[in-house]
Image (cartoon, rainbow, N blue to C red):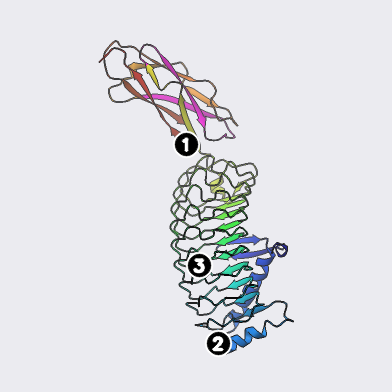
Amino acid sequence: MKTRLQSSLFIIMSPTILPISTGLITAFLTTIFALASVKSVQAHHSVTIDGAKHWCAGKTHSSNTNNECNLSSKSLTTIPADLFSGLTDLQIIYLNDNKLSSLPADLFSGLSNLEWISLSDNKLNSLPADLFSGLSSLQLISLSDNKLKSLSADLFSGLANLELISLSHNKLRSLPAHLFSGLTNLEIIYLNNNKLRSLPADSFSGLTNLQRIFLSNNRLSSLPADLFSGLSSLEWIFLSNNRLSSLPADLFSELTNLERISLKNNRLSSLSADLFSKLSRLKYIYLHDNPLSCRPELPPGTSFSNTVIASLPVCVHVTLVLSSPTISEKGVSTTVTATLQQPLSTAVFIFISVEPEDHAMAGDFAMGPNNILSITAGEITSSGEVTITAVDNSIAAPDKMFTVKAAVSGPNHVEDVTLTIADDDGS
């Protein structure tokens, strides 16, 4: 519930220390860490199934405000379907750190007040599709550190109050489409440390309250262009330690509240010049351990976490524009201008050249006295123009093709254009 989401805690997830501003999560993880500490100094304390039933029944009497059942670290290998039968006041169940490989489909049936479930650190390799069916009060599910390879598309269906899902440290190779559909209160998703190779384009569609996504340590080689579309509340995205070689130019364009992006240790050799340009609240970018020769320019107030990346030259993406891509050879001219993908903080100078193709020759055209375009800092369109004029040779021949090129100092990407000089002498 939102009234419980006010405090702050630093938790360790994967290699980075992450502040989570969530009271609910604070309480849950504090308990989990306390249980882990007990585990580190004590051996597992096994209990029988009857003992487990008695234990949970004793924890749910009316005087207990926590209404929790803690069966963590009990060496449980199986659980009967009726373990929680009749315990309708239960709000919290800890089953983490056991040896469970499967669960009965109706294990949580009738527990409409249940808010937290921890099933982490077991041996679960699959889950019944309706395991969480009817748990309308559920806010947090931890399934991390298991052996899950796949999930049912309906696993989280109807859990409208869910705020956190942890699926980290499993063996997931893919996600079903619409897995998180309808979870409009979801704030945090942990999918790090799996074997994900791709993601459906609508993986996070409609999750308007989602704040943090953890996808590090997978095998992702590409991402759909609209993967994060509509996620206006998103603040953090972690995609480090994957196999990404490129990113769609508009991947982050709608994320107006994004503050932190981690893309370190991928295979990125180039990035769109305006990849981060619309992210006015962006503070930190982690891009080190990529084979980059240049970097995008950042919004004001944003910094790279690594000085090597910060010292790289800014990438320049130039597009050439011809006033007329086809001209007659009877002394007709075309002009060349240039545009940038995004404004830069320094001026850009562009040197224009023309290369004949096939049977065309250098004598078929003439360039004006100026072959340099300049783009002022903060602008995207060049001032001035370069003129190319066709030369009439009075010889019947096929139309002639030329490539208009640009040279820009430093790492850059230039989109050349083709000029055609149409023959007017017949063939």
Under circle 3, the secondary element is loop
Q: Please, what is the three-letter code of the amino acid marked with disc 2?
A: Ile
Instruction: Using the rendered image of the protein, determine whether residue 33 is visible from the camera's viewpoint.
Output: no
Q: CA distance from mark 2 to mark 1?
A: 67 Å
Q: Residue at x 57, y 86 (%)?
A: 45
Front in this rendered view, residue 41 or 91: 91
Reading the chain from its start, which is encountered first: label 2 or label 3? 2
* Label 3 sits on residue: 169
Under circle 2, the secondary element is helix
Number of the front mark, 2 or 3:
2
Q: Residue at x 54, y 50 (%)?
A: 228
The image quadrant that residue 120 belongs to is bottom right
| Quadrant position of the C terminus in the picture | top left
* Label 2 sits on residue: 49
Q: Please, what is the three-letter code of the amino acid marked with disc 1?
A: Asn
Query: Where residue 412 appears, x then y in whole percent?
Result: 47, 36
* Label 1 sits on residue: 412
Residue 207 is a magenta residue: no
Q: What type of secondary structure mainly makes up the magenta span?
A: strand
Q: Please, what is the three-letter code of the amino acid marked with disc 3?
A: His
Under circle 1, the secondary element is strand
The image quadrant that residue 34 belongs to is bottom right
Reading the chain from its start, which is encountered first: label 1 or label 3? 3
Q: How many residues crowd mark 1 within 10 Å: few (<14), some (14–19), many (20+)? A: some
Q: How many residues crowd mark 3 within 10 Å: few (<14), some (14–19), many (20+)? A: many
What span is colored magenta in the figure?
328-355
Number of the front mark, 1 or 3:
3
Q: How many residues crowd mark 2 within 10 Å: few (<14), some (14–19), many (20+)? A: some
Reading the chain from its start, which is encountered first: label 2 or label 1? 2
Query: Where residue 46 appears, x then y in whole percent?
Result: 55, 87
